[in-house]
Image: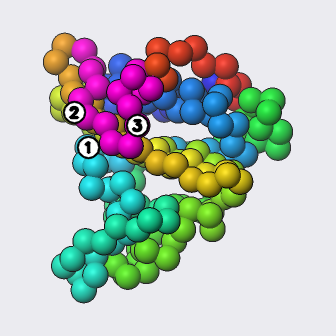
Amino acid sequence: MITLDLNNQDDPEFVGLVSKILNTCITRHRPADVFVVEIDHSFDRKWQRFSGKRLGLIGSWNRRLVIPPFDPRRVASQRFYHSEMPSSGSYQLAEARPLHIEQCGGDAGSRRLAQVSESGVFLWYSGETMHTNQGSVLLYQIDGSGTSDWFASFMRNGEWRLNRVRDISRRVLEDMINSPSTVGI
């Protein structure tokens, strides 16, 4: 099981929820590579498939999955895990180049997921959840059969609850959250 690091700004319940989602996706897809990126605070669904701004003004979204152009200063942490034998479910923490780099708006649309990994799960989640009542998860997945992506937001009113979903059903995501994880690290 891959465990996510906590800092003093992260709500342990939200990070636990994100960890369940991540490990369920890894168990289902068995990717060779896993990227986990904590973004400094909540983000919305507009980041899904977002590829930057044209002329610095007009947002553009791409059919092909590209690395979301989060400002690198918003990245609280990035972790990369690799498995030589994904079917084993065992992953090792490894070194990787940063996914988020300084770039011009037009360059963002050319940083395709397939250039980073042919078999991967990429998960972005919001940090600073200890003092807010909202959290976000964006997940991209790539393998030989293609790509998939979805976004979910969560709200806290006593406990964390699923708020909005995009490109994944509520039932599927709730099943992911409630299923046991079997991935080793």
The span shown in magenta is 159-174
Position of residue 123 relative to residue 26, above or below, is below
Q: Residue at x 27, y 21 (%)?
A: 161
Q: Amino acid at mark 2?
A: Gln
Q: Find the distance from the CA under tag 3 to the CA under tag 1.
A: 19 Å
The residue lying toward the viewer, choosing from 179 and 95, is: 179
Measured from the top left, where is residue 154 in percent x and y?
A: 27, 30
For label 3, the residue is: 168
Q: Amino acid at mark 3?
A: Ile
Q: Find the distance from the CA under tag 2 to the CA under tag 3.
A: 19 Å
For label 1, the residue is: 42
Question: Judging from the image, what secondary structure is the residue with disc 3 in?
Answer: loop
Measured from the top left, where is residue 164 in percent x and y?
A: 25, 34
Q: Decide if residue 154 is on the left or right side of residue 121.
A: left
Q: Residues within 10 Å of mark 1 (few under 14, many from 20)?
A: some
Q: Upstream in the sequence, badge 3 or badge 1?
A: 1
Q: Amino acid at mark 1?
A: Ser
108 drawn magenta: no
The residue lying toward the viewer, choosing from 171 and 180, is: 171
Callouts 1 and 2 close, C-beta under 8 Å: yes
